[in-house]
Image (cartoon, rainbow, N blue to C red):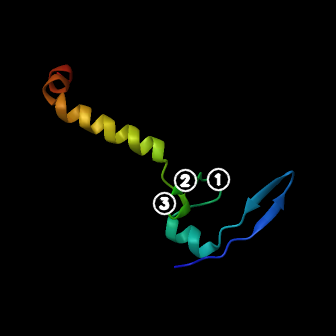
């Protein structure tokens, strides 16, 4: 699916208006946060925080390696 976005003046800033269809597909509502990330083919707007995703991946790796320690701490 392809959307053409237009830049618009919002106070002293410039913003992008996302079409309703895009918001529905991304499961976003007014007030939600989106992230603009650079990718090999340009830029992406996503609802996922790439930094948080990296942190969670690292945490999952640590939890797998230290499974026994975490199990003992949970007692």
Where is residue 63 shown, x and y percent of the image?
Answer: 23, 33
Q: Disc 1 vs disc 2: which is toward the camera?
A: 2
Against 16, residue 48 (above or below) is above
Q: Give the spatial CA distance, label 3 vs label 2.
A: 10 Å
Against 37, residue 24 (above or below) is below
Label 1 packing within 10 angstroms: few (<14), some (14-19), many (20+): few
* Residue where numbered disc 1 is placed: 31
Q: How many marks?
A: 3
Q: Quadrant of the C terminus?
A: top left
Helix or strand or loop: what does disc 3 sit on? loop
Q: Disc 3 vs disc 2: which is toward the camera?
A: 3
Residue at point 49%, 48% (across, down): 49
Depth order, front residue of 70/75: 70
Mark 1 and mark 3 residues within 8 Å of each other at the beta carbon: no
Depth order, front residue of 11/36: 36
Helix or strand or loop: what does disc 2 sit on? strand
Residue at point 55%, 53% (across, down): 37
Label 3 packing within 10 angstroms: few (<14), some (14-19), many (20+): few
In the image, taking residue 55 as reference, residue 70 lies left or right, namely left
Residue at point 54%, 54% (across, down): 38
Task: Give residue 60's quadrant in the image.
Answer: top left
* Residue where numbered disc 2 is placed: 37
Q: Give the spatial CA distance, label 1 vs label 2.
A: 19 Å
* Residue, far right: 12
* Residue where numbered disc 3 is placed: 40
In the image, taking residue 12 as reference, residue 44 lies left or right, namely left
Residue at point 56%, 62% (across, down): 42
Against 37, residue 54 (above or below) is above
Task: Give residue 34's quadrant in the image.
Answer: bottom right
């Amino acid at each position: 699916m392809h959307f053409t976005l237009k830049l618009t003046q919002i106070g002293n800033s410039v913003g992008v208006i996302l079409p309703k269809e895009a918001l529905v597909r991304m499961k976003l509502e007014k007030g939600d946060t989106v992230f603009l990330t650079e990718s090999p083919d340009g830029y992406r707007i996503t609802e996922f925080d790439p930094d948080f995703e990296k942190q969670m991946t690292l945490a999952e790796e640590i939890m797998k390696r230290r499974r026994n320690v975490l199990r003992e701490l949970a007692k």
